[in-house]
Image (cartoon, rainbow, N blue to C red):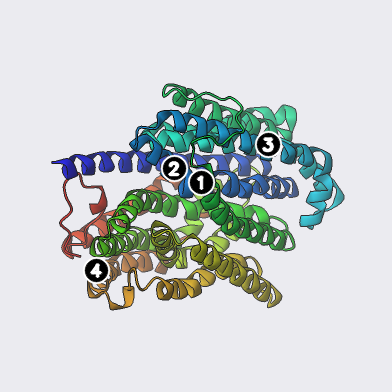
Amino acid sequence: MQDSTQSSKTAKSSFAIMLCTIASRLLGIVKARVLSSVFGASGVADVINFTFNIPNNFRKLFAEGAVNSALIPAFSSLLGLGKKRSSLHLFSLLCTYQAILLIPLVLLSYFFGEEFISLISDFDSAQVALGAKLLPFFMVYLAAISMGAIFNGVLQSHHNFLHAYLSPLLFSLSVIFGVQYLTPYLGAMSMAWATLVGGLLQGSYSYLMLRRYGYRLKPAIRQADTPLKPVIGAWSLVVLGMGMQVLTQLVTYHFASTLSEGSVTAFANATIFYQTPYGVFFNAISAVSLPLLSRSYALGQMQEMQKHTRLSIVQLTSLLLPSGIILFFLSQESVSVVLQTGNYTLADAQLTALALRPFLLFMVTTSWYAMLLRLGYSANRYALMTKITFLQNFVDIILMWVFITLGWGIISLPLANGISYVVLLGFLSFKLRDLYNPIKDTRLRRGLLRTVAANIPILGYCLLYASFGMTWYQSGSNLRNFLILSLLALGSLVVWLLSYALLKVELLSLFRSKKQGSNL
């Protein structure tokens, strides 16, 4: 009964995460559409995307990595042991140290923004000046959402997933309405003000929800009876890996800024389209599987750990493989229907679709790599996972440089990224073979083969459509084209579901509210 109740709670949390992530991705696409319509793929758009990418990458250091690796386990342990007072004090300590770290960064961006943008970009003087004006606003946004990440981490420790995943929607709504209605008055600075307000709204909402549990923002320095040192230790290791990812992203956008005008915007938009299916499905699967992996390892239940890993890999494949096939063949159509309006031309949409396709080719293997990383984290192998993260990003940078030198243009960026994940996937599998060996897992092979077979009809449907060489999408974003794209997507979804039903490929069995009985 207890397992059934816990599984039911897990299912509800997973669906809440999935629904909020879907809403977040959809708003992200709407946001990209508004930015593309207002600013096009011009030099101004390149500066906005390039400059916003700076705090967006730092977010991995001060928000996402820390919450996932250290904060949630620490607060969950304290609350489980009934140490609410220690939990309150740890919250105050982390907020204090976060503020001490972030306030100087905001000040540096204000006084030395122009020198920094000039150093890491290939922009002309006017573009550098605009980036320097935008950067301080974006860094305040970084400070707000970094504090918000602590708030959301504690909320999740209290099993309040809904409000933790709802808060980012406020940021997207602020940017959408701010850019749409303030640009005639503020120009490119509408993005600066909309981002600032959105970040403050996001952080404030999370804090208001958290206050109900007794947490308050107040300075604290002394560690007292809190597990501050272990939290900082785990956070530091992940930050090293995340820092390498930030460096790689900066290098990627630098390479993009050296290509033809509009390449930065095209790459940024391609990432949004790619992250829509990947983010929705991977977040939902990993949110459920990571606690299961950690619990199995802590209890020494290796067979359970291997079962959860296998099931996660098969589920990710069953969701991401058809998504990747469909979006690959409808990439040009999707980008044109969503973004091709206002100043965003057909040529801009074609460049975005070109950058999107290599991402989709490697979407499944990328998810396998990320899932195995979480397997390593669940076994407390932070140092090894950090080293592998460093190696993957190093390979990524080297391959980008080689491909751009060969003259491959914008596809060099996503292609290098995908290949680096494949290379390190093999290495990661080898290093974690004592925990789980996918090569020797016959059940995994059977599950993957069944999934691949079930996707053959989907591939056939897409190839049949592509053979007609239709150009209806070239007129851009309008109601007619939206309906055509919707019908094509609906048709592919019907083929997907029928094929999976025929070959008995299970979907989302991780979310079932009863005890799992998968035959994988």
Pick whichever, 376 or 160, lies toward us. Answer: 376
**Secondary structure category for the residue under label 1:** helix
Q: Residue at x 51, y 30 (%)?
A: 89
Quadrant of the image occupied by residue 111: top right
Say if 37 sits above or below 487 in the image. Answer: above
The amino acid sitting under disc 1 is Val
Residue 473 appears in view? yes
Residue 193 percent coordinates (x, y): 68, 30
Instruction: Please tell me which of labels 1 and 4 falls first in the chain.
Output: 1
Quadrant of the image occupied by residue 369: bottom left
The amino acid sitting under disc 4 is Gly
Instruction: Please tell me which of labels 3 and 1 falls first in the chain.
Output: 3
**Mark 2 vs mark 4: in front:** 2
In the image, which disc is placed on residue 231?
1
Marks 2/4: CA distance?
A: 35 Å
Q: Residue at x 17, y 62 (%)?
A: 504
Instruction: Please tell me which of labels 3 and 2 falls first in the chain.
Output: 2
Residue behind mark 4: 447
The answer to whether the residue labelled 2 contacts the one labelled 1, judged by CB atoms less than 8 Å apart, is yes
**Secondary structure category for the residue under label 2:** helix
**Secondary structure category for the residue under label 4:** helix
Residue behind mark 3: 100
The amino acid sitting under disc 2 is Ala
Q: In the shown orientation, is residue 479 left or right of residue 298?
A: right
Instruction: Report crowding for label 4: few under 14, some 14 to 19, many 20 or more residues within 10 A (C-alpha).
Output: many
Residue 48 percent coordinates (x, y): 70, 44
Marks 4/3: CA distance?
A: 50 Å
In the image, which disc is placed on residue 74?
2
Position of the N terminus, as image quadrant, is top left
